[in-house]
Structures are given as C-alpha cells and as structure tokens.
C-alpha cells in the first residue's frame, strides 16, 4: 500500500520515548522490539497485490490496485480457539499490531504507516474508502472505531428500559480520543452533552461542536462538578465516558452517573500503551462509586 496519511497515536509517543512495555500487568504484557516503523492509523492506495489481481474488502467486494483503503491496525492469527470460533479480533491469542509488535527486523520490514509504502500481511482486514470521503478524514477511521464503547453503552441503557436516543452524555477528558467520543455522541443524536477537562481551549472547542455544558476540572472540586452535572441533567448523565487515561479519574466518572448508567473507560495511562483500548462497562449507581 502506498501510504497517503498516517496518524500519530498516544502509543507512538511512548514508542518514540523508548517506553517499550505494553499491556503492563496483563496476560498480554510484552516489550516491543526496535527498530520499528510506527503508524497504525493509516489510509492509502493499493500499489500491488501478491498472488492475484484482486483481494476482498471487509464486505467481500473485490479490491484492485489503485483503490483507496484503510487497513485494520491489527492482524488476528485465524488459528487460535478464539479466531476459529469467530470471536472479535481482540480475543486472538496471537494478535499482531502494525507499528507495534510488527517490527522492522523481519522482512519485508515495512510494517508501519510512517513510510512511503507499507506491506500488509495476509488476513489483514481491509476497508474500502468511499469515493466522497477525503483521505485526511479516512485517516481517523481507527480512532473513531474506538468509540464503539458508546454504542455498547447505548445498547445497555436501552436494554434496561432507557431511551435509545436523546440520552444525556458526559465525556471526561477532551483530548483527541475524548473529542472523538464527543463528536460520536452528537452524531448519534444525544441530548445533553457535557464536556469535562482541565484546559479551557479544549472546552471551547467542545462548545463549538455541541457541548451543552463544559466544566473545568482544574477550577472545580468533585462535589462542585457533581452539583453542576446534576443541575444540568437532573438525574445525572445516562452515559459517562472516561477518556483521561488516568485510572484515578474513573471513580469520579462513576460518581457522575445516573442510577444504573453505564460508564465506559477509554484510553490509556502513562505506564502502559496498548494499541487497542478495551472499554470497561459497569453499572454505576450513585451510592456505590
């Protein structure tokens, strides 16, 4: 694939600084191997296809040289018990990650998007870029895919008898990942939309994109934030998404929740740097945080 755009993830920052341990404290803990080419948020054009003139995309349609694609950031092995039983890709026991576990020591070496060309392994899911979607927007595909926790939280809310649209949402931490969740919530038709961060510049941007309440966490304490949120929503947000990347903030996020509201923790702390973050969805009554 000839690379058109490649994003810069928080994981890449850790890799650049030599912080090589990933998934610390889990069964998947590992040390990445240098040298490697970073870049797993990629969009590009198929330059050549080995072994044929076409290859199927994620929907089974043929892709050919010259087509624009977004390759998945991860490659499942297709052989472990989870792959053979059609579990989601992140259950794979031998999952490989472009720009992370796939390093430049092994030929053909080009396993990251921060290069002119990138080699895509067999079994890599390939997503066709629609004709009307610019490359610079398509490059955000992997980042926006991380917001699937919001979809799951909405499903849980609806399953418990809540509304499947128009719900109140709070995003804690309006960095790049938090901002994507804010945009996702607005696109999916949420009602009240609350943004909490320590930087006024981020909160100003959140207001421009539809936040109905912004709170500076550096200028308020937990009790004041809870009062402001309850005043804005009456019962507390139906969905709370923690995108700060700090474990300490998750308890505060749970306290904000309405009774039995799902809370989704996204992002990563500075001590570890997974290429894919898995949401933690919990029932979070006001009295149990």
Image (cartoon, helix red, strand yellow):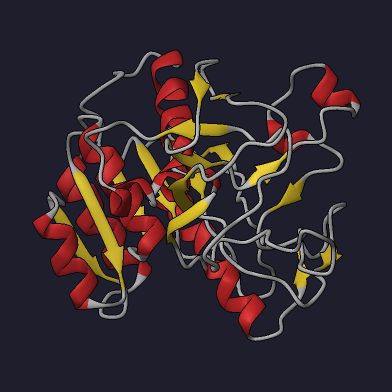
The one of 152 and 55 positioned closer to us in this rendering: 55
Vertical relation: 129 (above or below) 173: above
- In this view, the residue in front, 94 or 253, is 94
Residue at the extreme bottom: 17
Instruction: Determine the residue positioned at 76% across, 68% down.
Output: 104
- Where residue 235 sits in the image (x, y, percent)? 27, 38
- Vertical placement of 50 versus 35: above or below? above
205 vs 274, left or right, is: left
Query: Which residue is at the front of the view, 11 or 265?
Result: 11
Q: Residue sitting at 76 percent across and 36 percent down?
A: 76
Task: Indicate the quadrant where residue 35 lies.
Answer: bottom right
Q: Which residue is drawn at 70% across and 33% down?
A: 89
What is the count of numbered marks? 0
Q: In this view, does 185 lie to the left or right of 276?
A: left
Displayed quadrant of residue 12: bottom right
Q: Position of residue 102 (x, y in %)?
A: 76, 58
């Amino acid at each position: 694939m000839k690379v058109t755009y490649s994003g810069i993830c928080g994981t890449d920052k850790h890799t650049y600084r030599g912080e090589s341990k990933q998934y610390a404290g889990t069964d998947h803990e590992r040390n990445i191997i240098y040298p490697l080419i970073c870049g797993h948020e990629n969009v590009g054009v198929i330059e050549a296809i080995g072994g044929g003139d076409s290859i199927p995309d994620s929907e089974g349609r043929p892709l050919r040289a010259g087509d624009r694609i977004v390759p998945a950031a991860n490659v499942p092995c297709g052989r472990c018990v989870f792959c053979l039983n059609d579990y989601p890709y992140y259950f794979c026991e031998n999952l490989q990650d472009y720009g992370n576990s796939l390093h430049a020591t092994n030929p053909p070496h080009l396993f990251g998007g921060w290069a002119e060309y990138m080699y895509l392994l067999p079994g890599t899911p390939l997503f066709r870029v629609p004709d009307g979607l610019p490359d610079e927007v398509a490059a955000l595909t992997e980042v926006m895919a991380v917001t699937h926790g919001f979809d799951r939280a909405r499903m849980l809310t609806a399953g418990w008898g809540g509304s499947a649209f128009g719900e109140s949402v709070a995003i804690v931490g309006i960095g790049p990942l938090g901002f994507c969740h804010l945009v996702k919530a607005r696109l999916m038709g949420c009602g009240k939309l609350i943004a909490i961060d320590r930087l006024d510049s981020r909160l100003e941007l959140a207001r421009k994109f539809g936040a109905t309440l912004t709170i500076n966490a550096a200028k308020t304490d937990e009790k004041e934030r809870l009062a402001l949120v309850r005043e804005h929503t009456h019962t507390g947000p139906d969905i709370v998404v923690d995108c700060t990347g700090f474990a300490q903030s998750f308890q505060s996020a749970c306290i904000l929740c309405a009774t039995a509201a799902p809370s989704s923790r996204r992002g990563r702390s500075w001590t570890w740097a997974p290429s894919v973050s898995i949401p933690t969805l919990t029932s979070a009554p006001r009295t149990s945080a």
